[in-house]
Image (tube, coloured by chain):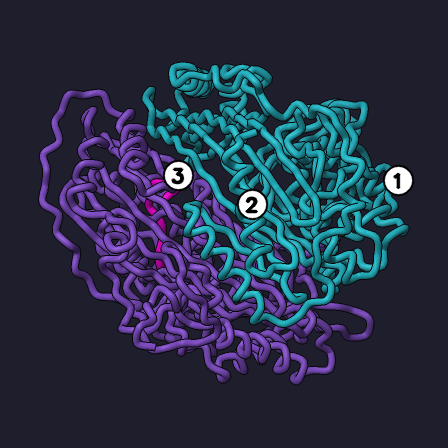
Chain colours: A purple, B cyan
Amino acid sequence: MGSMSRRTFLNTSLAIGGATALTRIIPNIWVQPARAATVGFFESEFGINNILCKKILEKALSKGGDFADIYFEHTISNWVSLEDGKVDRAYGSIDLGVGIRTVKGDQTGYGFTQELTEESMLAAAATAATIANDAMKYETKEFVQLDVKNHYPLERLFTEISLSLKLPLVKQVNEKCFGLSGHVIKVNATMHDQQKRILIYTSDGVKAEDIIPRNYIAASVVAEKDGRQERAGWNFGGRHEFSYFTPTLVDRLAHEVVKRALVLFDAEQPPAGELPVVLGPGLTGILLHEAIGHGMEADFNRKGVSTYATMIGKRVAEPFVNIVDEGITDRQLGSINVDDEGVPGQKTMLVENGILTSYLHDRISARHYKVNPTGNGRRESYQHYPIPRMRNTYMLSGECTPEEVIKSVKKGIYVTDVSNGQVKIGEGDFAFYISQGNMIEDGKITKPVKDINIMGNGPKMLQNVTMVANDMELYEGGTGACGKDGQRVPVSFGLPTCLVKSLTVGGVQKQGA
Amino acid sequence: MNKDMINLCEFVLKTAKDAGADDCRVAYNKSRFVEVQYREHKAETVKEATTQGLGVDIYVNGRYSSQGTSDLRHDALKSFVINVIEAAKLLEEDPYRSLPDPRFYEGRKDIDLNILDKEYEKLTPEHRHKMAQELEESCLQAGGEKVISATSQVYDEFAEEIILTSNGFWGEQQSTVCYKFAEMTAQDEGDRRPNGYHYAVGRAMKDLPSCKKIGEEAAARTLSLFGGKKLKTETLPIIIENRNVGRVLDGFVQAMNGWALQQKRSFLLNKKGEKIGSDIFHMIDDPFVMGGLGSRLYDGDGFATQKRIMIENGVLNEYYIDWYRSRKLGVEPTTGGTSNLIIPAGKRSVAEIMKDLGRGILINGFIGGNSNSNTGDFSIGITGTLFENGQFTQAVAEMNIADNHMEFWKKLAEAANDPWTNSSWHMPSLVFMDVVVAGV
């Protein structure tokens, strides 16, 4: 064992991570490697060093410009799935490339290549440089390695974990789900892990390197009762170690997903119209993501196209409403040690005591507003330039209890499960889809409801948050992703139980009819 | 076709067989694209790159794995393939997995689908910048004083694909795709800043409408959203504008898919041959549309493509079933997914139809929403314009429609004469009667 390199084990797991040639194959064996090193991967594997990167940045700024950066990425992704009782399929990908950006004011030139050769990278830098046409000369700055707290350290890389260790967990999902109810007729389960390595060099002297894990175990079941079928899905994940994925977690997953499927047999689409809506804790934070988060991304405000463009410093909600976007909660899906343009992950207050306090900035918008960037410059991959994006977005707990919130509603909807949402930035109009919830009648949770789109207007909704409970929960899943300008990035949400006094519920029949 | 690409695929196929794979499929894609975006009379972003990736499906000892990589160095590829095989061996056996029966590869048409603009390389950076400028300028001019921001984008891409399998399939294709796009945000009353856009997509720039026309339409669409408000909940006829039909139809088409059927996640299970829509509900899958964005001579399995009538007079004729699902379901395969999906256009314009409908809503955009593939229930937010006796009277926002696909398509009353061809789904505007539109 002593002679076996970490790289060999990387190749023997399901993750097909070989950047160098294999000498021998020993499947299904795992040995304890050294703690996963964040720094030095691109240098040891691809010969990327300060001298080369200085040369590339100089090329990117050869026609002028204010700023340039280089973003190297090597991402290994794996999925192993169960269908019809068998773990009989595995999917994966390796993404390797580098993106080079030149920024001049609010203009961006961008080129990328999948070949990490000097020639290819200089060609991509030359493409990026075309955005500018000055005669300015780039002043070399010495690179300083960014030293930040690691919010998702790994004892073992997922790529070093054999498929033979993942497979039983996925198999267990099937057994547990079928074991929980005779109504379950189909179970699908997937375990996903991704390991993204990034290295960033900026023309103002930042060098940052990170390993960003992402993983989840997901289950989806179909249940049948009296000839009717219903389905539900659930997952647990984030930026975890493999040790997070235990039989106990699988058990929780199975209970969650089966419970959610069975309740749907009694659920109906609720009446249409305007109703008070109580949002249960956790995943319902999608509401904040859509109703305010996107509108606070500074690129929309810099261009004046967001409904929030003139609201900084103004009251937008009751004094007990506090909303945060941050990248620093350990293991949370939206957490980032460093953003994708070399700015440390941090916490940003969007709304403090009801007052709108800060936009979410990337470097371009921060320069525009003459403020510091907030660590929100994110990108899907080396194929994209960074733009302001959310991380973990949530509302802080208030003072009342969840029971008090529910009790205050005579007739309304209680939301427990949200599948997706969307917003129109300029109007502030948003929608989110309730895959399940309940009616509230006379202050009590009653019959289940399902499959409704709920609509609202962001600024109006914020004003209409009239109660906030003391039970803030963060979404515990690993599948949350946000799409903007053709780029998807992992994000998370959170919410305490809260009351929005009126939203449009897209039900099926006229209210009261 | 690029000789290096072919050589690399053959190398991977041979490596896989030598390393013990029973069968193997290799797909190699490569593309070069340029994107230019303008705002405030200058280039906001310029992006250009070549991207490539190689996908390998391995069949070994009755087991299956599918992996992709963009690291195409020979040594790296060799270890990649060997590892896919070794990892696949750890999985459980799946007796339904195999490469397709080669008889389905046969009968491929030998025609030029006109999906490659042979003059693509003549496009110059100057030409792209000029188009983006024209798009922005026309949008700004048409928007007038109300404009807050206008952005334009021009994109073009040349793509090459080669697919080989160890049981004799050979597919290769070169194609181009390009688009012109303009969007505008304008100042409405209060803090509302409506955003509208327009675009055209095709195989060649020369086939697209003028930049002026697209920019002007983007402005007009934005201005039409002014004063948008929520109305009282009401049961009305609706017209879903051509470009938006796909958003609702998607929930229906997903339920026609073999995966959904075999995994019992489809409200269309056992509905083949049954009436699931009104008499005028027809849906055709036609892979042979000249220059179509979904045109193809072979599908994802390598099957020679065919034109298929999926729904006729409201009766479900066919499902989308690929090779693997056909084996699991024990039925003949059709094809795994849509090519050019067409609801035939009708005879009358939207304006003519509106005159006959009295009071209704023309839906010009959707927001949020989803569809339950098991039950057919769906719910989706809308923006649009209320009309009465053929005249637009009020912009509508923050409203919603909810229905069930098994009922909704029976409400289809008419298709307009305006097929939308900037997508592989060619949909005309569609009229549905008696739909609950939820608001106040």
User: Mark 3 and mark 2 in contact (Cβ < 8 Å)?
Assistant: no
Mark 1 residue element = loop
Q: Is residue B160 above or below residue B262?
A: above
Q: Amino acid at mark 1?
A: Asn
**Quick one: label 1, few (<14), some, or many (20+) residues within 10 Å?**
some
Mark 3 residue element = loop
- Judge left or right: residue A378 versus residue B84: left
Q: Amino acid at mark 3?
A: Asp
Q: Which residue is mark 3?
A: B191
Quarter where residue B131 is shown:
top left
Mark 2 residue element = strand
Q: Is residue A97 above or below residue B422?
A: below
Residue B313's disc number: 1
- Judge left or right: residue A85 versus residue B131: right
Q: Earlier in the sequence, mark 2 or mark 3?
A: 3
Q: Position of residue B336 (x, y in %)?
A: 71, 48
Q: Position of residue A383 (x, y in %)?
A: 39, 41
Closest to the observer, B129 or B237: B129
Q: Amino acid at mark 2?
A: Ile
Q: Which chain's residue wears label 3? A: B
Co-location on one chain, circles 2 and 3: yes
Q: Closer to the observer: label 1 or label 2? A: 1
Q: Position of residue B108 (x, y in %)?
A: 76, 35
Q: Is residue A80 above or below residue A432?
A: below
Let me know if residue B151 appears in the view. yes
Which residue is pictured at 33% across the width and 68% down the height?
A6
Q: Closer to the observer: label 2 or label 3? A: 2
Q: CA distance from mark 2 to mark 3?
A: 19 Å
In magenta, the rendered stretch is A382-392
Q: CA distance from mark 1 to mark 3?
A: 47 Å
Q: Which residue is mark 2?
A: B367
User: Mark 3 and mark 1 in contact (Cβ < 8 Å)?
Assistant: no
